[in-house]
Image (tube, helix red, strand yellow):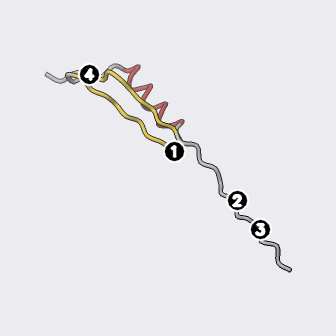
Amino acid sequence: MEKQIDKDKIHTILTTLKDLEYGCVTITVHEGDITQIDITEKKRFALKKKQQNKK
């Protein structure tokens, strides 16, 4: 028998993926049911190169 996945859980996962720029989503399943969703988000900043003073 195939289990149905709660629409709220699907919505949460899809919204998280849509809003996430860099990072990961971990979905924990226990006995065939989604029990936990962990989001690790990374913020990236552009590197500024040091300007060298030329004389």
Mark linked to residue 51 = 3
Q: According to the image, label 4 marks what residue?
A: 33
Q: What kind of residue is marked 3?
A: Gln
Disc 3 versus disc 4: nearer the observer: 3
Q: SS of the residue at dot 1?
A: loop
Which mark sits nearer the N-terminus, 3 or 1?
1
Going from the N terminus, do you reach mark 3 or mark 4 first? 4
Q: Residue 22 carries which label?
A: 1
Q: Which mark is residue 48?
A: 2
The amino acid marked with disc number 4 is Asp
The mark that comes first in sequence, 1 or 2, is: 1
Give the amino acid type for the residue marked by disc 1 in the picture: Tyr
- Amino acid residing under circle 2: Lys
The image quadrant of residue 19 is top right
Q: Residues within 10 Å of mark 2 (few under 14, many from 20)?
A: few
From the viewer's perspective, tell me whether residue 54 is left or right of residue 30.
right
Which of the pair 44/7 is nearer the observer? 44
Q: Where is residue 12 in the image (x, y as percent from the top left)?
A: 44, 25
- How far, Cα to Cα, is label 3 from label 4? 54 Å
